[in-house]
């Protein structure tokens, strides 16, 4: 009985530790039989000596197999080899005691504990061990009736032992399965909790952003109107001083440009908060995606390729088509910008579990895990200062959410990123 | 007779900007800083167009325009707001977003000249 290695592929729940705990019993049981045999032949010293030699040799060999042979040749081969000393031990003890009841007890004892019940072919090993021992015993003049009884007992015992092992294995594997299920449930719970925290955070940022946007928007509305009027008036003025002419040509136009930028940001912030209120209409996903792809092509650098595949049907949708094409455009342009000069961007649409889905995939630089966590938070950007406000994905998130949908991102740093947008099919 | 426009907004600078725009185009303009003051004005005044902000202390723009429908049924109504979501509100007028486009605002006010 032994095992540093569990059976087969290592998934056996009956681990080496479980089995090691019965080694003590095995050795103890064998020792009792040897001692009883010695007592039986007490006074006949050559026989006592023979039993002692067999006992020590067999035990040392059994112990040695456990300790050193298994790591080297594997548990199956070691168990095969262990048959030999055990046959010699049983035959030796049998001959020394004239095949007494005590010596023959080794047969059922073997069935109960030894021969690697946890390995693949315990029954064959037991048959070989017991068979050869029985043949020698029969030839050597053992009581046939006693021998037959012991063989019957051995077979019975073996069946019981195998059954016990299987029972233990089934209980343990069920426990293992329960633990796995529990761990999975726990993981899912944590993921759901993190998701809801992230959503809550985005919602509160949305409210804050929306409030700030409205506060900025009000003064911006008259600033815009006044500066526009000023520029118009300066243009209508035929005679301007050199300084005022410079204002007309340069200062006020660049001020207007700044105003437009502020207004665009405020606009984005408001859309992130609530999504633009348009009336929901039925629309075709492929049509909107095609529009986005057409516009996005202008952003491709030479060497970059944009693949669009909308052949797969997707469910009918109802919502705000302009928002969906804006989300798609945003994702595609991001993918193009993240791609290398010879990069490829794939856009496809289809259906998944009754929902419409479109995917934008690139083989660009990927998104670092710390950025991935905050991807939909406003003003999170990896683009250079002035190249992006970090509002695009925040707005996209707001719009997709307004449609009852969700955005799923998977990214491998160095390998690329895939955005999947799921949109529930319209009820109509 | 020039078209008469009543402007209602709690932000004086917005009133000033709108007023300047419309006066230059030959409109008659009255202003009120909130809905309640506007309703007082409407007891004596019959504007062709009412342009109102949405979010104001007291009655909001939509509520004011509902009152305008009763007091001056002939007046064209314009809601001017940064709150895009009020666009869906049920009322019989036009909706313009802040910041407004001058040309768009003028074209809506020009409708006030129609009978």
Image: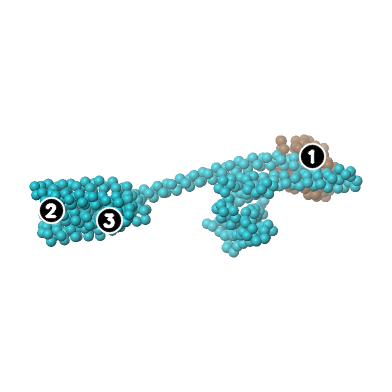
Q: Which chain is cyan?
A: A
- Compared with A297, A400 (above or below) is above
Q: Are marks 2 and 3 on the same chain?
A: yes
Whether residues under marks 3 and 1 lie with C-beta atoms below 8 angstroms apart, the answer is no
The residue lying furthest to the left in this view is A43
**Residue behind mark 2:** A96
Q: Quarter-wise, where is residue A150 in the image? A: bottom left
Tell me the chain of label 1: B
Q: Is residue A215 left or right of residue A135?
A: right
Tell me the chain of label 2: A
Residue at 35% x, 51% y: name it. A13
State how far apart marks 3 and 1 are (Cα): 98 Å
* Local secondary structure at mark 3: helix
Residue in front for this viewpoint, A288 or A364: A364
**Residue behind mark 1:** B15
> Horizontal and vertical percent for residue A207?
63, 41
Residue in front for this viewpoint, A194 or A282: A194
State how far apart marks 2 and 1 are (Cα): 121 Å
């Amino acid at each position: 009985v032994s095992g540093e290695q569990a059976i087969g592929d290592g998934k056996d729940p009956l681990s080496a530790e479980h089995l090691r705990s019965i080694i003590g019993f095995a050795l103890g049981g064998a020792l009792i039989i040897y001692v009883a045999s010695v007592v039986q032949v007490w006074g006949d010293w050559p026989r006592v000596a023979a039993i002692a030699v067999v006992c020590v040799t067999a035990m040392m060999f059994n112990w040695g197999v456990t300790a050193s042979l298994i790591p080297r040749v594997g548990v199956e081969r070691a168990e095969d080899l262990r048959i030999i000393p055990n046959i010699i031990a049983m035959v030796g003890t049998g001959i020394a005691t004239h095949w007494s009841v005590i010596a023959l007890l080794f047969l059922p004892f073997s069935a109960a504990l030894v021969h690697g019940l946890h390995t693949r072919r315990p029954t064959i090993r037991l048959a070989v061990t017991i068979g050869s021992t029985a043949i020698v015993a029969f030839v050597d003049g053992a009581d046939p009736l006693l021998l037959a009884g012991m063989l019957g007992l051995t077979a019975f015992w073996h069946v019981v032992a195998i059954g016990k092992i299987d029972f233990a294995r089934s209980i343990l594997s069920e426990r293992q399965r329960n633990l796995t299920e529990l761990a999975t449930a726990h993981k899912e719970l944590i993921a759901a909790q993190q998701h809801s925290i992230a959503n809550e955070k985005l919602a509160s940022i949305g409210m804050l952003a929306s409030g700030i946007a409205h506060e900025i928007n009000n003064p911006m509305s008259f600033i815009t109107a006044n500066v526009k009027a000023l520029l118009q008036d300066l243009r209508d003025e035929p005679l301007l001083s050199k300084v005022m002419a410079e204002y007309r040509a340069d200062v006020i136009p660049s001020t207007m440009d700044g105003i437009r930028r502020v207004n665009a940001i405020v606009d984005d912030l408001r859309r992130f908060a609530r999504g633009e209120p348009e009336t929901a209409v039925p629309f075709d996903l492929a049509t909107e995606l095609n529009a986005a792809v057409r516009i996005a092509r202008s952003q491709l650098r030479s060497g970059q390729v944009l693949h669009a595949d909308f052949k797969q049907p997707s469910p009918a949708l109802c919502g705000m088509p302009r928002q969906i094409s804006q989300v798609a455009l945003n994702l595609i342009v991001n993918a193009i910008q993240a791609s290398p000069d010879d990069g490829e961007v794939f856009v496809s649409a289809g259906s998944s579990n009754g929902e419409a889905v479109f995917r934008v995939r690139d083989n660009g630089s990927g998104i670092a895990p710390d950025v991935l966590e905050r991807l939909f938070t406003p003003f999170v950007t990896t683009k250079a200062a002035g190249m992006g406000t970090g509002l695009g994905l925040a707005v996209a998130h707001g719009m997709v959410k307004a449609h009852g949908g969700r955005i799923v991102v998977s990214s491998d740093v160095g390998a690329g990123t895939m955005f999947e947008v799921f949109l529930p099919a319209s009820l109509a | 007779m020039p078209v008469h426009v009543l402007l209602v907004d709690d932000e004086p600078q917005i009133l000033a900007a709108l007023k300047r725009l419309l006066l230059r185009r030959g409109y008659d303009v009255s202003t009120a800083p909130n809905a309640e003051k506007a309703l007082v004005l409407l007891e004596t005044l019959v504007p062709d167009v009412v342009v109102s902000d949405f979010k104001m202390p007291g009655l909001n723009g939509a509520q004011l325009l509902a009152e305008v429908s009763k007091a001056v049924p002939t007046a064209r109504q314009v809601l001017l707001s940064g709150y895009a979501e009020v666009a869906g509100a049920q009322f019989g007028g036009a909706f313009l977003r802040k910041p407004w486009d001058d040309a768009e605002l003028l074209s809506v006010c020009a409708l006030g000249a129609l009978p």
